C-alpha cells in the first residue's frame, strides 16, 4: 500500500460520510498492477453495519465492463468478430430490421434496440429465455449504425445471448469461467448472488440530489433501476447490464488486469477509439452517456476521451483505467447521486486523473 494515497483517499471518504453526502462507500486503487490503496467508510444500508473491504454494493451498469471484456476475449480467440451479424448466430434476428445488427453496433450502443420490451412483473427480468424471445419480437428504432442510444438494460440479453451462442455455454458460466475466476474476481464480483455473498451486501438509497423516481419507457411494470438489487429474485439472477454486485476491489482489479495483459494492447487500443455515428460529435454535457468505444465508456477529458477506459454505474459506482497515470480505480457506494458524483470526482482530482471534465 502507498501510505500517502491510502490516507488521502480515506480522508475524502470519511469526510463524505461525515458531511452526509455518502452513507457508506469504498475505493480501491491499483497502479501498474499493484494495489496502492483500499479504503472504506460509513455503514451499509439499511442495517447500519460498518462497510468493510468485503462489502458488496450494487454497481448497476459498471458490470457492463465484464460483459464487454468477455466479448473482446471471444474476438481475440477467433470465436466471432466485431463485424459479425447477429442473424448468423441468432436466427430470430434475420428479419424486422434486426438483420442489419452486428456485434459492433451493440458494443457501441448503435443497434437501435435500446427500448425495453414489455414485462408484466419485475421477476420476468430474471427469465433469460423469455427476455431474449421478447427482444426478437421488436424492431430497431433506427437503422443500426446511424444513431447512438444507450442500451441500459437490453445490453444484458443482446450482448449476452450473442456471446453464449458464439462461445457455447450459459452466460453465468461464461462470465465466471472466462473473466471473473481468471482475474481473481469470483468472490468480489457477482452476476447472481449466492448464499454467502447475500450476507455481505449493502442495498442502495436515493441521495438528496437525485431527481424523482423514473420508470423505463415501454415497460408495463413500474421499475426504477434501484429496485433491481432490492428484489431477492433479481439479486440471484444473471442480469449483466444492471444487476451486478461488486466491491471497489473487484472493479479496480478488473481494469488493472485488463491492462496487465488479460486483453491484448491492440484490443484495448481499438476499444478506446471513440465510436460515434457519422455526423455526430462529442456532447457538450459530460454527463451524456454517448461517449463509448467498444463496450466500454470513454471517461477522459474532451481532448482525449479514450485516455480513460471503463464504465460508470447508475448513481455513482465506477471502475476504470487511466492510461496517463497508470491508475486502475474502483469506487462503490450506497447513496445514489447524479452521474457527476461529487465524491468520485474528488477521488479523481486527488489522484491527478483528468476525469471527463468538459
Image (cartoon, grey):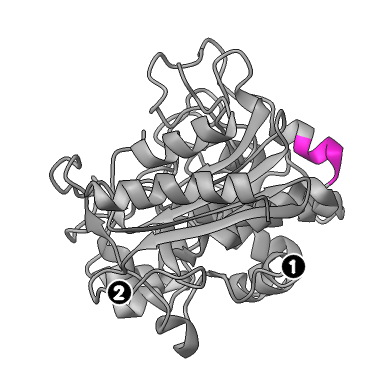
Q: Residue at x 71, y 64 (%)?
A: 179
Quarter of the image containing the N terminus?
bottom right
Distance from the alpha carbon under mark 2 to that under mark 1 = 27 Å
Q: Nearer the viewer, mark 2 or mark 1?
A: 1
**Marks 2 and 1, the one that precedes in the sequence:** 2
323 over 218 or under it: above or below: above
Q: Residue furthest top?
A: 279
Helix, strand or loop at disc 2?
helix
Q: Is residue 166 left or right of residue 137?
A: right
Residue holding disc 1: 178
Judge by depth and name the residue closer to the eye, 104 or 318: 318
Residue 217: percent from left, percent from top:
23, 45
Which residue has dot 2 on it? 123
Location of residue 201 by image quarter: bottom left
Q: Nearer the viewer, residue 15 or 301?
A: 15
Name the spot of residue 263 as percent of width and height, x first: 81, 49
Q: Is residue 15 magenta?
A: no
- Secondary structure under tag 1 reads helix
- Quadrant in which the C terminus appears: top left
Q: Position of residue 122 (x, y in %)?
A: 26, 69
Q: Which residues are magenta?
A: 264-268
* Residue drawn at 47 percent across, 20 percent down: 357
Question: Magenta part mainly helix, strand or loop?
Answer: helix
- x and y, in percent, of residue 272 in the image: 69, 31
Residue 125 against residue 92 in the figure, above or below: below
Residue at the outermost bottom position: 195
Q: Which mark is residue 197?
A: none
Amino acid at each position: 500500500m502507498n501510505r500517502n494515497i491510502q490516507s488521502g483517499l480515506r480522508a475524502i471518504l470519511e469526510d463524505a460520510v461525515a458531511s452526509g453526502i455518502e452513507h457508506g462507500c469504498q475505493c480501491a486503487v491499483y497502479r501498474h498492477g499493484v494495489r496502492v490503496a483500499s479504503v472504506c467508510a460509513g455503514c451499509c444500508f439499511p442495517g447500519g453495519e460498518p462497510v468493510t473491504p468485503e462489502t458488496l454494493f450494487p454497481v448497476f451498469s459498471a458490470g457492463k465492463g465484464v460483459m464487454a471484456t468477455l466479448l473482446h476475449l471471444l474476438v481475440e480467440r477467433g470465436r466471432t468478430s466485431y463485424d459479425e451479424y447477429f442473424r448468423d448466430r441468432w436466427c430470430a434476428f434475420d428479419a424486422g430490421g434486426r438483420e442489419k445488427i452486428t456485434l459492433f453496433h451493440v458494443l457501441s450502443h448503435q443497434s437501435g434496440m435500446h427500448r425495453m420490451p414489455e414485462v408484466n412483473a419485475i421477476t420476468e427480468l430474471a427469465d433469460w429465455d423469455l427476455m431474449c424471445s421478447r427482444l426478437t419480437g421488436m424492431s430497431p428504432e433506427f437503422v443500426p449504425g446511424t444513431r447512438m442510444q444507450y442500451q441500459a438494460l437490453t445490453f444484458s440479453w443482446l450482448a449476452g445471448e450473442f456471446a453464449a451462442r458464439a462461445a457455447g455455454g450459459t452466460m453465468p458460466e461464461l462470465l465466471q469461467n472466462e473473466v471473473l475466476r481468471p482475474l481473481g474476481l469470483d468472490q468480489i464480483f457477482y452476476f447472481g448472488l449466492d448464499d454467502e455473498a447475500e450476507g455481505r451486501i449493502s442495498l442502495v438509497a436515493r441521495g438528496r440530489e437525485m431527481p424523482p423516481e423514473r420508470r423505463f419507457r415501454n415497460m408495463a411494470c413500474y421499475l426504477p433501476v434501484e429496485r433491481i438489487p432490492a428484489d431477492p429474485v433479481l439479486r440471484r439472477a444473471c442480469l449483466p447490464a444492471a444487476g451486478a454486485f461488486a466491491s471497489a476491489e473487484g472493479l479496480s482489479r478488473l481494469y488493472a488486469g485488463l491492462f496487465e495483459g488479460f486483453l491484448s494492447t491492440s484490443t484495448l487500443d481499438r476499444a478506446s477509439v471513440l465510436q460515434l455515428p457519422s455526423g455526430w460529435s462529442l456532447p457538450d454535457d459530460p454527463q451524456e452517456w454517448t461517449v463509448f468505444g467498444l463496450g466500454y465508456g470513454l471517461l477522459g477529458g474532451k481532448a482525449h476521451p479514450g485516455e480513460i477506459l471503463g464504465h460508470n454505474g447508475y448513481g455513482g459506482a465506477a471502475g476504470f483505467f487511466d492510461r496517463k497515470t497508470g491508475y486502475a480505480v474502483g469506487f462503490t457506494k450506497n447513496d445514489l447521486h447524479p452521474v457527476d458524483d461529487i465524491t468520485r470526482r474528488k477521488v479523481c482530482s486527488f489522484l491527478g486523473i483528468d476525469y471527463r471534465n468538459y
